[in-house]
Image (spheres, helix red, strand yellow):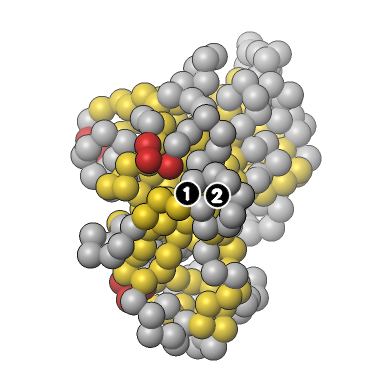
Amino acid sequence: MNGVATDHEGNVYVADLGNNRIQKFTNSGAYLTQWGSSGIGDGQFDRPFALATDGAGNVYVCDYNNGRVQKFTSTGTFLAQLGQYGSFYNPTDVATDADGNVYVAESINCRIQKFTGTGAYLAQWGTQGSGNGEFFTPFGITVNAAGDVYVVDTGNNRIQKFATPHVSVDLALPGTINVRSMGKWVTAYLQPPAGFDASAIDASSIRLFGNLGARPLAVDATSPSAIGDQNGDGVPDLMVKFDRGAFDLTVFGTSAQVAVNGMIAGQAFGGVATIKVLRSEIIPPPRGVAYAGMVTTMRW
């Protein structure tokens, strides 16, 4: 047994890690039902590590070794999957807020990711370190009634609290990338939503993320950056650049997803973009890891 959660009716859900199943009980301990088995399919688990419920009674389970979070009805019917091996790396805890958003703690990637209840990506924050907003093996997460997020920063022996909402920022990257090109930088345009100014973005906090646990990349200190209106919509954005040669990326099929996060006016933001990749070389996945479709790793 590893994780326990309750729903609004007082029922108790237990993550039975060793048996790869979820068990449900009344609050007096009477057995009600169970679901799950060992595997990689929908409703199967490889070490269900933690779980949480939302206001509608749905159950979210951190499927640790399968690198995903699965969503079920209160009786165990599979509904959806958040993430895949590559967007999550060993998720260790999950929490929900009053709006039904889902927060996932990743101890290996030292970050928090935020999604809608249907699995749409909203934001992420955190990187490895000991400063404010940084983590070293964040192992637990919870959200209070006001929407504030508390993270158990295990390796740093502390609890960190974050305000909500977390600001979403559009990430503009080239729609197609030739991975054999010799360009120096990867350029991103960060456009804050209404009520926030691009000049309030803390450039030192910005990180570019690939996947499969690759460490995030900071803005290249030698590259030019500027505030302008790249897409012509009348809203200023911040242009930043990253060292192309230092960034690893893994492709599923012919596309890859990248993300940027940072801080703006004291709040965490995140943006994500999917790019089409040309002229890549196929390599086998790591030992013991199975992917659906072609997997390609390369430097841009």
Residue 1, given in percent of the width and then of the height, sits at: 49, 35
Counting every numbered tag in the picture gives 2
- Callout 1–callout 2 Cβ contact below 8 Å: yes
Secondary-structure class at tag 2? strand
Confirm whether residue 42 shows in the render. yes
Residue occupying image coordinates x 76% and y 43%: 79
Q: Quadrant of residue 56?
A: top right
Instruction: Find residue 170 and name its label.
Output: 2
Of mark 1 and mark 2, the one earlier in the sequence is 2
Q: How far apart are marks 1 and 2 (CA)?
A: 9 Å
Q: Is residue 98 above or below residue 169?
A: above
Can residue 18 be seen from the camera position used here? no
| 221 relative to 168, above or below | below
Residue that label 1 marks: 237
- Direction from residue 190 to residue 52 in the image, left or right: right
Q: How crowded is mark 2: few (under 14 residues within 10 Å), some or many (20 or more)?
A: some
SS at mark 1 in the image: strand
Q: Residue 234's spot in the image, x, y percent?
A: 58, 46
Q: Does 240 sit left or right of 279 as displayed? A: left
Which residue sits at x=37%, y=55%? 226
Q: Residue at x 72, y 25 (%)?
A: 57
Rendered location of residue 70, percent (x, y): 64, 45
Q: Which of marks 1 and 2 is in front?
A: 1
